[in-house]
Image: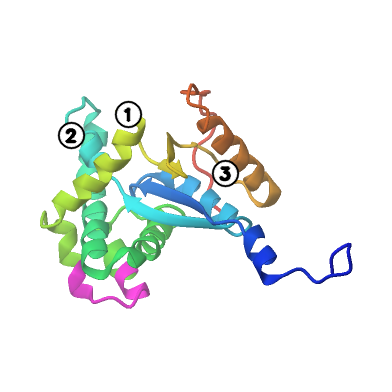
Amino acid sequence: MSLNGRMPSAKTDAANIQPATAVEFWFDPSCPWAWMTSRWVDEVAQQRDLDITWHVMSLAVLNEDKHVSDEYRAFLPRALRYTRLVAALAELQGQHIVKPLYDALGSRIHPGGSTAPDQVIPAALSELGLDAELARYADSDEFDEPMRASHFDGIERVGQDVGTPIIAVNGVAFFGPVISPAPKGEQAVALWDGVVAAASFDGFFELKRSRTRGPIFD
């Protein structure tokens, strides 16, 4: 009941409903830092009304014309298999499969510590109740075009000197944040508000310090 003794109208209630915050998240399934950031975004989504769209990007594409170490270059074909699988299933199954597939792959790659795609991929598909035959798309370039388009859609919003993850909030895009461990509860929301506020300032470009720890999975 309002102060004047009247019940609020349905029209008034509708006017007070705030739309969900539109969020887009670009990830490479192999990147531990993107995994940490995605767990943070999941935590924030439990406390804020976020409408999240998950997109694949590719460390292999990002580094295809760059000078990297031999060790890192040897890792990229493995990373490419995961991005190709996600891109293929997004086209074949629809956008709704992207986040569950990311979770199923990432939980095995990162906290699970697996470096064997031939084990990770069948297990992830089985977890989601998907046909094991879909694993073949991890070794196919059939859906490279939409995979690369998704990658460059993210990169073009923030510039070339970044990696994964990329987040866009109501159209304002930024790289990162790079965090470890993923904060929980009020701390997660406080970080979210701070990052989004900083990124929304058109003249804000970079805030960085050296990493003092690796990814902490929990």
Query: Callout 2: few (<14), some (14-19), or many (20+) C-alpha neighbours within 10 Å?
Result: few
Going from N to C along the chain, the mark reached first, 1 or 2, is 2
Amino acid carrying mark 2 in the image: Glu
Please name the residue that numbered disc 2 is placed on.
64
Looking at the rendered structure, the secondary structure element under dot 1 is: loop
Please name the residue that numbered disc 3 is placed on.
181
Amino acid carrying mark 3 in the image: Pro
* The C terminus, quarter of image: bottom right
Q: Return the x and y of residue 195 as percentages of the image width and height.
A: 56, 36
From which residue to which does the magenta span run? 124-134
Image height of 180 relative to 101, above or below: above
Please identify the dominant SS of the magenta region: helix
Q: Nearer the viewer, residue 128 or 96?
A: 96
Going from N to C along the chain, the mark reached first, 3 or 2, is 2
Image height of 64 relative to 15, above or below: above
Going from N to C along the chain, the mark reached first, 1 or 3, is 1
Which quadrant of the view contains residue 197? top right
At 21% across and 24% down in the image, what residue appears?
A: 67
Which of the two marks, 1 or 2, is nearer to us in this view? 1
Query: Callout 1: few (<14), some (14-19), or many (20+) C-alpha neighbours within 10 Å?
Result: few
Image height of 104 relative to 202, above or below: below
Say left or right for 89 vs 2: left
Which of the two marks, 3 or 2, is nearer to us in this view? 2
At 49% across and 47% down in the image, what residue appears?
A: 36
At 20% across and 61% down in the image, what residue appears?
A: 88
Please name the residue that numbered disc 1 is placed on.
159
Q: CA distance from mark 1 to mark 2?
A: 16 Å
Question: Are discs 3 and 2 less than 8 Å apart at CB?
Answer: no
Say left or right for 199 vs 58: right
Q: Which scheme is used to colour this image of the protein? A: rainbow
Instruction: Answer whether residue 33 is visible to the viewer in this image.
Output: no
Amino acid carrying mark 1 in the image: Gly
